[in-house]
Image (cartoon, helix red, strand yellow):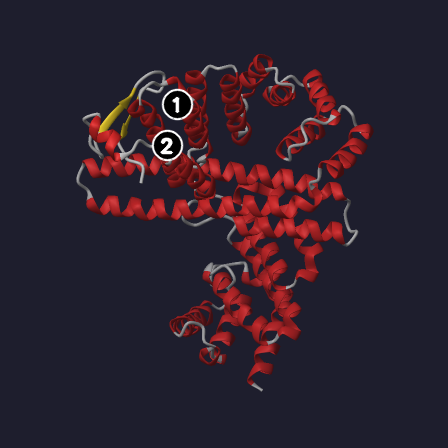
Amino acid sequence: MKTKKFLMIAVAIGMAMSVTAQEAAESKYGADSVACVTNLSIYGEAYKQWEAAKFAPESISMEMVNAWREVFLNCPRSSQLIYTRGEKIMDYFIRTNPKEKDAYIDTICLMMDNRAKYFPTDPKTGASQVANIMGRKGFLIYTYNKNRYEEAYNVLKDAVDMDASQMQAAYIDAYFRAAIDMVNNDKAEKMTVINVYQELSEVVDNNISALADTEAELVAAKEEAEAGGDADAVASFDKQLEKNEKSINNNKGTKSNLDNLFQPFASCEDLIKVFSAKMKETPDDVTLLKRITTILDKKDCADSKLFLDAAVRLNELEPSPEASYSLGIKFFKDRKWSDAATFFEQATKTDNNDRRYRAYRNLGMCYENMGSLGRARDIYRRAAQVDPTNGEPYLLIAMLYAGSAKQYNGDIERGAVYWAAVDKCQKAKSLDPSCSDKANSLIRAYTAAFPSMETIFFNDYNEGQSFNVGGWIGETTTIRAKK
């Protein structure tokens, strides 16, 4: 009986809202401010008790739900907590009444729409939060009922179009999954998945770049606080850095999920077939040409005729860093290192952070193949500056060092090259857990090339001692023996 009453109250919200919304919007506390304040207090205190009980089903109260409903209907602009707490209440009903979940999802949609209407800006920052609210609306629709994928897709698409920078990692993941459902159920063409993949990949790359900038600012601020002896500020910056690092990892996880979900649509044969048809229809569509060259490059399909045709045409229509990058890939595949380096150098001027990183990385590879090891190392360092959270540049430097070991004479001197290489692998792991497996594999190989304890001893050195690697490397490392 109690559950039925809850159900009736929750479902009734949608029917009553259209009648009361205009009146309730006139003031913060609605037409009856005394009743609003009273109900705010009743549901607020009861909600805190429910929260303290870890939202146990037996701890939810009829009084709380009634009071919350009255606040939601009659003074919807009194507090944002109406909506965040309302989500928790609706979540309870969905989980305990799964057969009626669509009615509760409709109520959630109504809550999200009202929150966007009455709280369009974040009270703390003053910035618009409508796109974020709509993103959450689409995410919740898809989370609670994946059969409503088309509705979720349209809501999330509008949210991304509104302001992609407000999209959280979970919203991005839901949007892409909903897009795939659209294609799998013949509600959209396969090109939809390709377009959404490219769009969301850029959003995630921009998120990671912005978070990396924030991390650098926080590290600098923390160092300043440490120098000033402000322990409280240091502790605060540590918490912010931890939160920022979590956000970076979430976005990297989302990026990996996007790539994994895209795989069934990402065979070179399939991509070329879809893109060829589109390019035949609109051969001068610059946006399409950029999408073709970007995705074919990311999916290792850049040796196709389609990629070359798109790169050449893009450069003719709109000479740009993006067009230069595509031509650089073409010459790189042809092993024309000097020509490729020229175009990659031009490509580093792009505003796209992911593309700029890849341009520097590939430029370094060109110089490495031309035998300019010092120049290659400098450029890999530039790549690391563009994406401070990526361990790949340090692995490239490590392999660059190890590959030059034969240039050094003497067991200790050659060993020092491998010590320096292992240092770079350790740096890569510490920055980017995703490259740990490759870093550990290289570390095992390079550690096997360390000099023995006897060799170190008979050359008048000790383990743990600093050692300067000479030649073009010119770095200080630490002496270690092969175990």
The N terminus: image quadrant: bottom right
Circle 1: residue type:
Ala
Residue 449 is tagged as: 2
Image quarter for residue 407? top left
Q: Position of residue 51 (x, y in %)?
A: 41, 70
123 vs 174, nearest the viewer:
174
Residues marked 2 and 1 touching at CB (< 8 Å): yes
Q: Residue furthest bottom?
A: 1
272 vs 10, nearest the viewer:
272
How packed mark 1 is, by other alpha carbons closer than 10 Å (few <14, some 14-19, many 20 or more), is: some
SS for tag 1? helix
Residue 43 is tagged as: none
447 vs 229, nearest the viewer:
447
Circle 2: residue type:
Ala
- 205 in relation to 61, above or below: above
- 243 in relation to 388, above or below: below
Q: Position of residue 323 (x, y in %)?
A: 64, 21
The residue positioned 25% from the left and 35% from the top of the image is 453
SS for tag 2? loop
Left or right of 312? Residue 220 is left
Q: Position of residue 115 (x, y in %)?
A: 54, 56
How packed mark 2 is, by other alpha carbons closer than 10 Å (few <14, some 14-19, many 20 or more), is: some
Residue to which mark 1 is pinned: 405
State how far apart marks 2 and 1 are (Cα).
Answer: 10 Å
Label 2 or label 1, whichever comes before in sequence order: 1
The C terminus: image quadrant: top left
The residue positioned 66% from the left and 74% from the top of the image is 99
Q: Position of residue 122 (x, y in %)?
A: 46, 49
Task: Report whether residue 31 is seen.
Answer: no
The residue positioned 79% from the left and 31% from the top of the image is 276
